[in-house]
Structure formats: structure tokens, C-alpha cells
Image (spheres, rainbow, N blue to C red):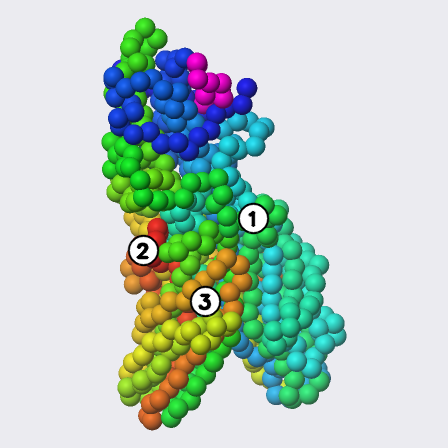
Amino acid sequence: MTRLKSSTFAGAPARIASVDASILKRLVRNVAGDLALIYDKLTGENGETSTIDHSGGPRGAPLNLPLIMQEIHKPFTQPIGMVAKYIGDTYLLAAPVRVVAGSLDWVLEADIDFVVASPRDSHVNVVLIDDTGAETNVPFDLSDPGEGEGSRITAPITFAATGTYVVGVTARPRLTSEADSFFLVRWRLRQAANASSTNDTAGFPATGLGEAYDVATTINAVAGIDEIQAIDDGPLDGKVLVDLTRWLQSMTEYVMGGPLPGNEDRTVTQEWHHDGSVFASEPQPAVPIFAECLGAVLATGGAVVTAGGATGALDWCAPFLLVAVPSPGMQAVARKQIYLPDFDASPSKLKAVILAASGAGTPTAWKADVQTGAGNAADVSFVQVGSTVLYVADVDAIPFTPGAINDVLCRIQSDAAVAHDELQVVGWCLYFEA
Amino acid sequence: MPLITSTQRLKRTEVHSLAPALAKIPIALAGGARTLYELATGESAEADSEPGTPRNPQGGIGVDRSGYPWGPAFRHPLWSTTGGLVGGGNVFGEKDFVDVVAMGDKVTRSIAVWVRPFVDRQGAPYTRGYLSLRVRSSGGGAVDCTVTLARAESVDRVQSYSLATSSTTGETKSDVLYIALTPGLNRLVLAFDNADTGDDLIVESASLNQIVTRTH
């Protein structure tokens, strides 16, 4: 018994729509083979490896979910006594982002109220740093959107490939009085608009009341047609046509996420969750969850500055520990409460990149992990980004609760008694990836 | 020879053994298979040709999981404030979102949420963002605060929620409000009104989340 399956999509020529056209058994075989191909790509069944994981055609349309969508509303000021002193290049905003398969063309938009300071005099810049530490200045536009929130930096960003990058807005702040500050409102990194983008479904029939079409309740109620059912010398079997109809229409509801046109309600009971509960080999898409900056840090590393005989910490400061000793172990420096998708939690493919800065060499005494209500991931060490002052910790297999609000903590610890401000946590991101 | 595509649907009575062999049968089966292939795989079924299916909201081919008919959506955060934290005293650089002082203080924040393109039909997953908050009481006393969320262009139509907490270590309040969202940039107003005479309400962080797969 050989299950019919197309190696590539066969389809049928438009001439079959002719009134006098024959209904060829070859057409039945091709449809059966094509549906088997689609089914296997959706489910990972029958050894199919080119599955639908939304990494781009033929493996599904890319998702292009926003990478950064952070509201800040915090002032950036220089410590008391350092006004009119150049404190040097500073990462005002910096976050690690995990670029997954899909569009590589994005737009960075940062709303910053420079108040009385001049962006030009403060040498504002947009930078992109790859995993080798190579830093690229990104040309940007500066405009006033007229919303009473200052200026908008708009920068088109094209990533060379998938992977981990640091996206940042830098400045060499020149604040000339104690009253001066920047006010960081928000920033976002989203997909660049596509000229063909539309919210219109013209071409697809609208859902409405009508006669019920024959739809199976599960997409695996019919999982294949055997070649013997579609041989040339055999009759045109009504059962085969019924099975093909039910299979096609149930998979269509599954993929579209709603009832077939003409049906009031959805008949398929299975949800396309990517949780592996029905189809063990079902692929899980790579999905970015969020990325954010936790505070500013000097480009030489450090969030505490000394200038003109004064010492102080930057406002809008990348967090660091006040005491860094082996106990009390992992300590949280950031927390989010966010929904996570209905993905398979065992094994978990939820990951994080924690971005830190250190101006004192490789922070070998430090480790990081991520904790949720479902548990904590294994701790990891920090790895330098090229020869910069930036370091990343890649956290894998973070336990989580699918389809629910998760309380997610970013944590660090020092394994030795070290300078408490040796490591500053600049930002972090959370994402799903196989 | 171009491949056929179709969105016609067959009924059981049309495919029974003794049913007339109508042209609709091969059209619906073969054409429907092409439509399904392109929706699922995100590529044209015919190499080097335009797809037989409409473009998705992003202008691409195939379901992009933005809601029917473009696939069931994922649950995920749409927007969030900086991950503020009470660090137990050992963290410098904690950033609470807002501190709403007692005795009638009101704090208002204008926020902006960009939502990727989607078909803006009633009940579609991305038409609502659900607000979740991490909050605490400054002194451990009960705090009673009204949270409101509104679209900036129609501040008369607000969603309100009565929030209460007495936790000094912080607690999460999930899905307390939802706000209508449209594709693209959404300008919203988030306000906290503390009528309590005792303690401040500290809002450590906030998030807006997309929480359904098919429909609200």
C-alpha cells in the first residue's frame, strides 16, 4: 500500500475548467498527492523535513513581528556637578535583538525629547553591532512628528543575515545646565512597510450563512490516499472524492483559522498551536517576544562616571548590583509580565539574550539566567562581543507556561567577591527558536 | 499552462458515487489544493509566476498568522514598559513606570503601540490589546486606584478598572482592561487615579498583550 504524495506541487492546468473536459484519474492522483504534501509539511508526519515554520516560502510566510516596542518615559541627565563636562560616548539606548528568518528590512523609530540640548551638538547616532563586534553607523532622519514629545529618530535598518545583533542610539551628551536633560519617550524596531501591504481581503469570500460543506473535524481524519484507489483502469470512486474533499476543506479551515466560506462555524476542532500535542514532529516557528533596554551605559563600560572631581551614576542607568558576592546567588535585575504563545513547553525552545557592559575586562565571575513561574533555565556565562565592552549571555530552554501570562525575571549573580559595578545589564530579549 | 486555483467548496452530495461528474469537482479539488498550498507554504504553486491567492496583509504570500483568513494568531506581547523591578535593595537602577501618590493623585501617560498589518474585522485577534500590570503598595496598606485606558482620538470612551493591592513585594494583575487596536500606530492614554489616603500605588511595569488565537 503506497500512499500518494507529490514530491513537488503538481496542481492541474486551467483547461480542466472547460465544460467538456474529462475528469482524469491523473487529476485525482495529483490532488491526492498534493494534499499529502501539504499535510506532511503542516504536521511533520511521514518524515517530511521541509515543514511549515514560517521561515519564508516554501516553509510558510514570515511573521515579521516587531522586535522592540518599549515605552520608557524616563529622563537622561548627567550626575550633579558634571554639567558642561563631556562624559563621553554613551549608549542611550541599546538592546540585543534576535533576527529570525523573514524580512531583513526594518525601521528603528526612537522618540526622544532633547529639551534644550541640541542633538547635533550631542553627536546622536544610530548604531548596529553584529556578533563580531563590528559597529556600523546607520543614517537616520530627525523630525518633529508634532505630537509634543520632541523629536523622532527614524533609521532604516537592514540586517545582513539572521542572528543576534545589538541595536542602539548613542550620544555624546552635552548638557550645559543642571536643568538640562534628554527625555526618552519610547523606541520601536518594526518591519519596514511593504508597498503591497493591505488590510483588505478582497478575493477571499466573506464568511456567511449557507449550506454546510463537508469538513472533517480533524485534519488527520484522512491522512492519505493509497495509489490503488486512483489507478487509471479503476472507476472514479466517490469515496475517494469525498475523502479528498473532506481532507482539503478541513486543512483549509486549520490553516486559515476560521470556518470555510458558507459555514457559520468552524468544524475542525484542532488548533494550529505548534505545541506538538497532536503531531509530535510539528515544527515550531521562531518568534521574537520582546527586546528592551534597561538603561544607559558609557561606551567605555560603566554607569558611574567621574568628571570634574565629581562622581555619580547616570540617570536612566543600566542596573548593577550594589553588593557583588557569591551569596545570595541569583538576583533579579528586570521583570516582565507578558503572554507567551501556546507552544510546546517540553522541551522549551524559549531563549533569551542578556546584554551587559563591563569596562574592566571579561566579567568571568558573572553568570545569568532567566526565571519564570515554571522554573529557571540553566545559568550561563557572558561572552564578549568582538573586542567591545559589550558581553552577551545566551540562555536556552527557559521553562514557561504556554498560552498564559508569564512573570519573567532576568537574573545575574557573581561567583566571587568582585567590584559591584563591574557588570551593568544593558538590555535583554526573549524569543522562541529551535 | 497556468495552474488552476479556486475557492469553490464541494458538498458531500456533489461527490457521491452516483452524483453527476460536474466540472466543479476537479476545479474545486485541484484549485482548492493550490489555494491551500500557497496559504500554507507562502510561495506560489507555480514557479516564477504570481500566486493564485491574494496577498496577505503584509503584502506577501501565505498565512502570516495575523488572524482569519490569514491563519490563527499567536499569543504574545504587543507593547511593554521597561522591566522595572523591586530588587530587594541590592539593585541600583530600578525603574518603576509610575508612582501614583496617595490622596487623589492622577498620573497620565501617552503611549504608542505599533501593530503589524492585519485584516481589521470585528473580533479579529489583533483588534484588542489586553493590559497587564505589575503593582505594589508603597507602605503595605490597601491601595484603591482606578486605571483607565483610552484611545487618544476618543478620550470620552474609556475603559476603567478598579485596582486594589496591599502587596509591598509586588503582584501581577492580568488582563485588567482591553483597548481597541487598529493596524499601524495606535496612540493611547493610560491613566492611574489613586483615591486612597494612605499609600502610594507603584506601577512597576505594564504590558499590552494579544491573547486569543482566532476571535474575541
Q: Which mark is residue A197?
A: 1
Measure the alpha-carbon separation of dots 1 and 2. 29 Å
Ranked by sequence position, the earlier of labels 1 and 2 is: 1
Mark 2 Cα-neighbour bin, 10 Å: few <14, some 14–19, many ≥20: some
> Which marked residue is nearer to the observer: mark 3 or mark 1?
1
Q: Residue at x 43, y 27 (%)?
A: B31
Depth check: B205 or A233 in front? A233
Q: Residue at x 65, y 55 (%)?
A: A156
At which x and y percent is residue A105? 60, 49
Quadrant of the rendering where the C terminus of chain A is positioned:
top left
**Residue A139 visible at all:** yes
Instruction: Report the amino acid beneath label 1.
Output: Ser
The residue marked by circle 1 belongs to what chain?
A: A
Instruction: Say whether marks 1 and 2 touch (CB < 8 Å).
Output: no
Residue behind mark 3: B80
Q: Which residues are magenta?
A: A11-21
Depth check: B163 or A289 in front? B163
At which x and y percent is residue A254? 34, 40
Quadrant of the rendering where the N terminus of chain A is positioned:
top left
Q: Are marks 3 and 2 on the same chain?
A: no
Q: Residue at x 38, y 93 (%)?
A: B103
**Residue A103 visible at all:** no
Mark 3 Cα-neighbour bin, 10 Å: few <14, some 14–19, many ≥20: many
The residue marked by circle 3 belongs to what chain?
A: B
Q: Is residue B156 magenta?
A: no
Residue A168 found in image quarter: bottom right
Instruction: Report the amino acid beneath label 3.
Output: Ser
Residue behind mark 2: A403
